[in-house]
Image (cartoon, rainbow, N blue to C red):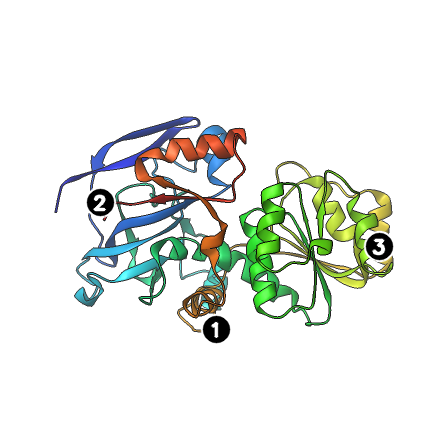
Amino acid sequence: MKETMKAYVLEGPGRLCFKDVPVPEPRPDEVLIKVMAAGICGSDIPRICRTGAHRHPLIPGHEFAGIVERTGSEVSEHWIGKRVGVFPLKPCFSCSCCREGQYELCREYDYLGSRCDGGFGEYTAVPEWNLIELPDMVSFEQAAMLEPMAVAVHNIRRIGLKKEETALILGLGTIGLCHLLFLMEAGQEQILAVGNRALQKRLAKEAGLPEEAYMDSKQRDIISWVMEQTGGAGADASFECVGRPQTAVAAVDSLGAGGRAALVGNPSSDILFPAEVYGKLLRKQLTVKGSWNSSFCHHREDDWHYVLERVSQNRVAPQRLITHRLPFEELEKGICIMRDKTEEYVKIMLMGNE
């Protein structure tokens, strides 16, 4: 085993360095993973380019999968050589939420790629508890998308849709398109989707969305279009996957009586509701739910196992959302594409070396 590895080290806001660092030594309860695929998340862009992370220096990256190369003293060696995905949130296991098994709501969590070293290195050390073993038919790039898929599924499951209800997706980046894939797979009968790029429209159509169920927000008003599509009734549920004021307000304003808005997009700025929209929230008795991360508790009914089962059965194909596959050495190219919007993209994936 070599002693050093190549990694992207964030030394401060806007200071990402590609350099040699020591290969991490797994703690007793950890394994050492050789990273085979790592996705660039939209949240990585401000973290790397503007705001920085919770601590520096730090190796970013929280969407990744790989092969177990070494185990800590308390971990069974049966893991060596296993192909794995990684749940990035490291719970404290002590707070009230953890005691209830709601690890995504942990009050004292650590997080791979934002609070401790993540997957933008050749190797990374993670707790055994965070591993999910991959079936042979699931590729590393599919497994590196388990995290955003599970985030979408978590949001959908919190709303509790009936198949005959109308679901509205606002935003068709990675998370929005993952919502679409899983709503389609579940047999949702009425889905409306709002995007703003030709690529998003094409991928939505390829996923099975009828052309008339897609709207370009640059060309039409969201609320009037939704009311037109629903005969004036409004949507039963909306999924806000952008985090911008306009789409957050539209997520509420587009609902019919008793509707539910599910907010999952990270906010880009303060979000204020006009008095008229707030009044509709009251008069229509609407429900607004926030969603954070996903459930992972080593049970086949949690979000990660739900997702993995459907990917392994080829019922959902997340690889269709990968628009760029870059060698590990070209992370900065992918970051520039996403930051500067120089090309249309959905998921940019870094591929490790065999």
Q: Earlier in the sequence, mark 2 or mark 3?
A: 2
Badge 2: residue crowd in 10 Å (few <14, some 14–19, many ≥20): some
Q: Label 2 to label 1, Cα distance in Å? A: 33 Å
- Write the residue at 41% across / 61% down: 94
Which residue occupies the foreground of this view, 346 or 18? Answer: 346
Q: Earlier in the sequence, mark 3 or mark 1?
A: 3
Single out the residue that lies furthest toward the left: 1
Q: Earlier in the sequence, mark 2 or mark 1?
A: 2
Q: Nearer the viewer, mark 3 or mark 1?
A: 3
x then y, percent, for residue 250: 75, 48
Q: Nearer the viewer, mark 2 or mark 3?
A: 3
Type of the residue with mark 3: Glu
Q: Is residue 70 visible?
A: yes
Decide: is 70 above or below 19. below
The residue to which callout 1 is attached is 301
Q: Label 3 to label 1, Cα distance in Å? A: 37 Å
Residues under numbered marks 2 and 1 in contact, where contact means CB atoms less than 8 Å apart: no
The residue to which callout 3 is attached is 228
Q: Is residue 52 visible?
A: no
x then y, percent, for residue 107: 49, 54
x then y, percent, for residue 235: 77, 60
Type of the residue with mark 2: Pro
Badge 1: residue crowd in 10 Å (few <14, some 14–19, many ≥20): few
Type of the residue with mark 1: Glu
Single out the residue that lies furthest toward the top: 15
Which SS class for mark 2?
A: loop
Which image quadrant is residue 156 in? bottom right
x then y, percent, for residue 221: 80, 43
Which SS class for mark 1?
A: loop
Query: Which dot marks residue 24?
Result: 2
